[in-house]
Amino acid sequence: MNAGHRDRPGGTGVLAGRAVARVGFGAMQLSGPGGRAAPAVRTAIAVLRRAADLGVNHIDTAHFYGAGRANELIRAALSPYPDGLVLVSKVGAEEDAQGKLHPAQRPEQLRAGVEANLRSLGVDQVSVVNLRRLDGPPGIRAEGDQVVDLDSQLAEMAALRDEGKIGGIGLSNVSLEQLRQALPAGVACVQNAYNVLDRSGEALLALCGEHGIAWVPFFPLGSGFPGTAKVTEHPTVTAVATALGCTPAQVGLAWLLHRDPRILLIPGTASLAHLEDNVAVSRVHLDPETAAALDSLA
């Protein structure tokens, strides 16, 4: 395994001051999200090791993915971790014994979430930890004592960074105003919904560009939640895929790489074949006419 592979999938981006492949890997599917069956341990480990072999050195995870399952698989597959591997996790929710997610927004819960990630990953520091806000969709929402002001959360995250338990602070599911509010604390990345059919985050992407913040879209193909438009089913996307001899998923991912150099991808899969397709997206070329056609979809 060589996380410092010189031929990084998608080219090279920057995350928290570290060079990473622009095509990374999202570990959520390894935990069997949404009641789906989790892949066999052997399969999950093979996918993770193959990703590293292909030059992927940015892995996105969370302890609340399967109550530590995703993190434990990463540890089993890749520890001792190779030089250059950037592990990114998130806090703000927790999973109960029945596999149901609940908000965990209070500062002491954020700290407990970081500690849980450190234990399950087997590290002294997580490269970046994203604070997942739950003010609105998609997913669960904060209510009651889980409605916490952002400044209190950022103060706790900054303390964890000062203690060396996290390397950088990320934000997830935030508004433009919240990102502006958080800038003085130092933000390494933002994870928000964004894809060829959903440009609602365009202003946030522009602000990230002004401040050198990585933009890491979650569900880059738009299929994460019920009722969300699926990029791979849009007729223009499928027509482009046919013309280019690639898959609709590759078209959607290629558009993101083409859209802005600060965009880092974390497509998830429990399939070796899909992993190979995701990594190969850097070979999909969008000429100006094709890119313009995709740009016009939203």
Image: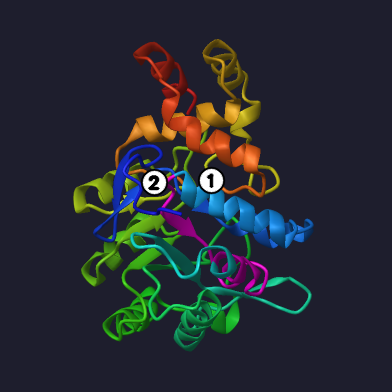
Q: Residue at x 45, y 60 (%)?
A: 172
Q: Nearer the viewer, residue 136 or 272?
A: 272
Q: Residue at x 61, y 58 (%)?
A: 28
Give me the disc on residue 267: 1
Q: Is 21 located above or below residue 291 in the figure?
A: below
Chain part drawn in magenta: 55-74
> Could you give the CA–CA distance between mark 1 and mark 2, rounded to whole angstroms?
10 Å
Cβ–Cβ below 8 Å for labels 1 and 2?
no
Give me the disc on residue 76: none
Q: Is 9 located above or below residue 67 in the figure?
A: above
Looking at the rendering, which quadrant does residue 69 occupy? bottom right
Q: Is residue 67 visible from the viewing direction of this image? A: yes
Specify the amino acid type for callout 2. Answer: Leu
Q: Residue 224: where, in percent of width, then height? A: 63, 48
Identify the secondary structure beneath mark 1.
loop
- The residue carrying pointer 2 sits among few (fewer than 14), some (14 to 19) or many (20 or more) residues within 10 Å by Cα, namely many
